[in-house]
Image: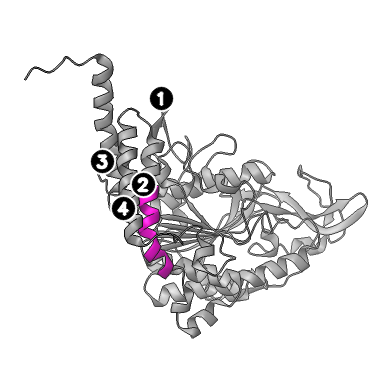
Amino acid sequence: MNLPPLTRRDFLRRSGVGIGMLGLAGLLAPSRGLQAAESGMMHRPHVAPKAKRVIHFFLNGGPSHVDTFDPKPALLKYAGQPLPQTFITERKTGAAFPSPFAFQRYGQSGIEVSDLFPKTAQHIDKIAVIRSMQAQVPNHEPSLMLMNCGDSIQTRPSLGSWLMYGLGTENENLPGFVAMCPGGYPTKGAENWQSAFLPGAYQGTYVDSQNTAVDRLIENIRSPHATPEAQRQQLDLLRTLNQEHRRERLDPRLEARIESFELAFRMQTEAADAFDVSREPQHLRDLYGSGVHGRQTLIARRLLERGVRFVQLWHGAGQPWDNHEKIEENHRKLSAEIDQPIAALLSDLEQRGMLEDTLVIWGGEFGRTPTVEMSGTTSKLGRDHNHYGFSVWMAGGGIKGGTVHGRTDEFGFAAVEDPVSVHDLHATILHLMGLDHERLTYRYSGRDFRLTDVEGKIVKEILA
């Protein structure tokens, strides 16, 4: 039979569909790996991984390092007086403001921790505290983007999305990247867990952990109108229509949409189980605590043991740790909400043999000033933003516990020894997960992009 000759447009269109199908095969594979969306091939980690999964406690708003994990007794000497050194701050600040919280040494390492985190401090020998973190600007929005996406200005994929792109998920029935924030979105909303120019399948899935019923935790997890069998038939029809639509187009967003439908259908059974903490014994629920942060941390552990790659736990909507006033009252309240859940998680992971390959991260987008914030001539008993030096800690897979890395000056204004940039932090996280931050790239708009841009070095001193 003689077939009509192909026009150039038809040839390109049919060839493009083939490429698209390779991409879809990668997206629908049981474990989506490095560049699967482009080649359909699975890639192994670049180096032997120390950790398989990550849980990130994000204290949005910026916790004060000089009130938590970086004691500064020199502030007592200048209490109520101007410090002998100054730094540019976003708002007017005044005299030295000694921490209202007591520090004491814990564990064999003798690392000092304030009385805001007494239960977490019991695990200090598992923890490496980086006291010399630095961000770029003293503003929430760009600092959130820097900490989560590696760039304070341009739209870039988030850390969790890069991990998904590089390693995939171990459970095709659950999202590989989950962001939980009780009561609504944090500042910058879903941009904190965006996939940007990476395929949409790698974007984080938001869960409002303030809710307790699975139907409220994840919107539309169940259909009130159709049985699972009817939904399967509807989805098959939808897939047929979408694939017919796609034959005329080359659009990775459509392929990501097809995958999202499939994932949503598969989640109906497994997500209901994973998010149901009533299945845990009472003594374990008591260990984590009855509040929303205890519940979301316990859910996070259940997700991690089911193969979810990256779970981010936000403290709440907006920026609750942004305590420009009454820092003693506000920081004490906030820390009381998460100290017990963090300690419970570390104990629980260790007991299950999961801590050795789970990376636990704690921190915010920046720290706070050692000087008191002012309202005119009146002290607000709070602290302004400080990006010059602050603390982040890590524990678990591949981390040398009982370690302090870097140092801020005697007042806690700026990192003065072994400064660590956010790019360095990201390079270290990727390394622990088995990924070389210089080789984990994605070609977009004619350039190979990476999470660490053109910077970043591994903080080897905190590695086991």
Q: Check contact, mark 4 vs mark 1: CB within 8 A.
A: no
Q: Amino acid at mark 4?
A: Gln
The kind of secondary structure element at disc 4 is helix
Mark 3, secondary structure of its residue: loop
Q: Are the residues flagged by discs 1 and 3 in contact, CB closer than 8 Å?
A: no
Question: Are discs 3 and 2 less than 8 Å apart at CB?
Answer: no
* Residue 197 found in image quarter: top left
* Res 358 visible: yes
Asked if the residue under mark 2 is in contact with the one under mark 4, i.e. CB atoms within 8 Å, the reply is: no
Q: Residue at x 56, y 64 (%)?
A: 209
Query: In the rendering, at what x and y percent does residue 230 appear?
Result: 34, 57
Q: Nearer the viewer, mark 3 or mark 2?
A: 2
Judge the density around disc 4: few (<14), some (14-19), many (≥20) Cα neighbours within 10 Å.
few
- Residue 272 on the magenta span: yes
Q: Nearer the viewer, mark 3 or mark 4?
A: 4
* Cα gap from disc 3 to disc 2, whole angstroms: 15 Å
Q: Magenta residues, as a range?
A: 260-273
Callouts 3 and 4 close, C-beta under 8 Å: no
Disc ID at residue 40: 3
Disc 4 to disc 2, C-alpha distance: 16 Å
The label shown at residue 446 is 1
- Answer few, some or many: residues within 10 Å of disc 2's Cα (few below 14, many 20 plus, some between 14 and 19): some
